[in-house]
Image: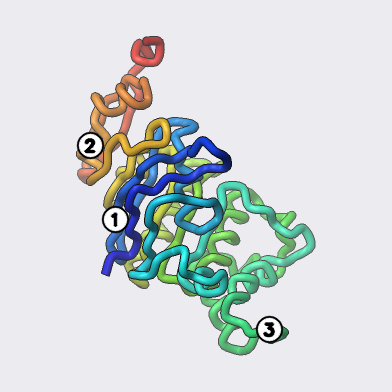
Amino acid sequence: MTAVWLRGVSAGYGADPVVREVSAEIEPGGWLAIVGPNGAGKSTLLKAIAGLVRHGGEITLHGTASDALTRRRRARLLGYAPQNPILPDGLTVTDYVLLGRTPHLGPLAKEGATDLAIVEESLARLDLRRLARRRLRTLSGGERQRAVLARVLAQRTSLLLLDEPTSGLDIGHAQVLLDRLDRLRREDGTTVVTTLHDLTFAAQYADRLLLLDSGGVAAQGPPAEVLTPQVLRRHYRATVEVLTTTGGHPVVAPVRGGEAAEQ
């Protein structure tokens, strides 16, 4: 069964849709990275999959039409982390991660031993146990990003939707976060959909890329097919070379000059 199925999806915030006629499929356990220039509609498409903006077309999650899902059922099925989450100032890391268990609790119910064990496991998997009692406001940018991911993991969903999870992180912290996310995906079989500005990270971690431009699908497929100098010149107006590391991983390298951006 396909994990995420999109057919003719259009979405936006007013009469004029930001995303238009997007179709794509993601297999269970796969990683799809949505890429594209600024304003292409990446975050809007992710929000449409998460059920946060109105959409036309069809979105199916693990065989169930998205429109047919209740809020609680959706929260049990997918975990969503926005690019700039609002973090409650007074909460500790543990209290914040516990919020991920809310969809699994009944009205007026309190967290039980199972919920606390899941939170403890989520903290451990993201190396946050030593920060468990720290207030969110005292964390660094990388630590906050890990806390957000831990909250999403505590939901125990089969689908993760992450909007620019490496935003604001230096290359080392971004690499560590993506490595951990990839390990979790392989261990748990979780399906991952991310938006990513960094094309090299997108190429090295995702199975498939969906390139948006002006709200529509410009290209999709394996990274090697999407990230070519010709495609990136056309849709990013960028002059690049696509290199290969000694380990066989692609690297998108800008070429000094920028003639393409001036055209």
- Label disc, if present, on residue 244 of the rendered structure: 2
Measure the C-alpha gap from mark 3 to mark 1: 35 Å
Name the residue furthest bottom: 113
Tell me which residue sits at (30%, 34%) in the image. 218
Which residue appears at 35% of the width and 69% of the height? 62
Give yes or no for contact between labels 2 and 1 (Cβ–Cβ under 8 Å): no
Of labels 3 and 1, earlier in sequence is: 1
Q: What element carries label 2?
A: strand
Q: Distance between the residues labelled 2 and 1?
A: 27 Å
Mark 3: which amino acid? Answer: Pro
- Residue 172 in view: no
- In the image as oriented, which residue stretches furthest toward the front? 15
Residue 54 located left or right of residue 134? left
Residue 241 point in image, percent of width and height: 26, 25
Q: Do the residues labelled 3 and 2 touch (CB within 8 Å)?
A: no
Left or right of residue 77: residue 8: left
Residue at point 36%, 72% (across, down): 188
What amino acid is at disc 1?
Glu
Image quarter hosting the N terminus: bottom left
Quadrant in the picture for the C terminus: top left
Q: Which of marks 2 and 1 is nearer the N terminus?
A: 1
Badge 2 amino acid: Thr
Q: How crowded is mark 2: few (under 14 residues within 10 Å), some or many (20 or more)?
A: few
**Location of mark 1 (residue):** 25
Q: Separation of disc 3 and disc 2 at Cα?
A: 53 Å
Residue 189 left/right relative to 152: left
Instruction: Tell me if I can see residue 241 in this picture.
Output: yes
